Image (cartoon, rainbow, N blue to C red):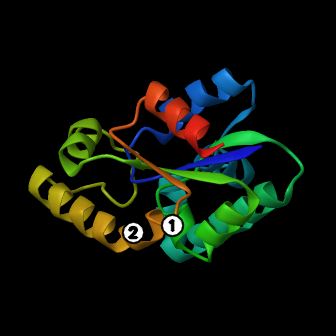
Amino acid sequence: MKIYLIGMPGSGKSTLGQLLAERFSLPFVDLDTVIEDQQQKAVSDIFREQGEDHFRLIESQLLLEWAGSEKSFVMATGGGAPCFHQGIDIINQSGMSIFLDVSIDVLLNRLHSKTDRPLLNSINAEEKDKKLKAIRTSRLICYRKAHLTVTDPTLAKLMEAIQLKK
């Protein structure tokens, strides 16, 4: 079983992914951590030094490798992973995708003091709000291709949605 959590930065993919993995006794995989381990540098450094396009190529290559493996896991994808290089198609063909749909207000609250988000660094609160709205709008068409959507996700809501899907 492969379960992919997709959604905006700050939507809870990593936090809920770890809990979901524990519940199903599956390994938890954070795609950004896999990238950092392989590249031996932080995602923010890859963005800064080599640009977003280079990062997206690495991200899509590793997503494809994990999707093609025989392993079962729960994966927290990066927020953009499903939206570049046919990521959502790869995800949907290899496992179950779950869109964690969280409001902009909640995202802003969660990301208020975060400095490790390359697309949101070095901007004030008003600019961050505009940027998050623009990113969300551009990615929604992709996110809505997920097998399941869970609004204001909690572990209980995720478990319920998965059980109903089975």
Can you see residue 127? yes
What's the mark number on residue 9? none
For the C terminus, the quadrant is top right
Element under label 2? helix
Instruction: Say which label, 2 or 1, has the lower sequence index.
Output: 2
For the N terminus, the quadrant is top right
- In front here: 40 or 66? 66
Element under label 1? loop
Is residue 87 left or right of 155 when viewed as pictured? right
Closer to the eye: label 2 or 1? 1
Q: Is residue 4 above or below residue 144?
A: above
In the image, what residue occupies the spot 61% across and 77% down? Answer: 85
- In front here: 5 or 64? 5
- In front here: 34 or 78? 78
Q: Is residue 150 above or below residue 24?
A: below
Q: Give the Cα separation between the discs numbered 2 and 1.
A: 10 Å
Q: In this view, does 1 lie above or below 96?
A: above
In the image, what residue occupies the spot 30% across and 54% down? Answer: 121
The residue labelled by disc 2 is 139
Can you see residue 58? no
Question: Residue extending furthest right?
Answer: 70
Report crowding for label 2: few under 14, some 14 to 19, many 20 or more residues within 10 A (C-alpha): some
In the image, what residue occupies the spot 85% across and 44% down? Answer: 71
What amino acid is labelled 1 in the image? Lys
Is residue 141 left or right of 29 when viewed as pictured? left
Residue 116 falls in image quadrant: top left
- In front here: 134 or 53? 134
**Residue 107 % position (x, y):** 27, 44
The residue labelled by disc 1 is 145
**Residue 137 % position (x, y):** 29, 69
**Residue 95 % position (x, y):** 71, 54
What amino acid is labelled 2 in the image? Arg
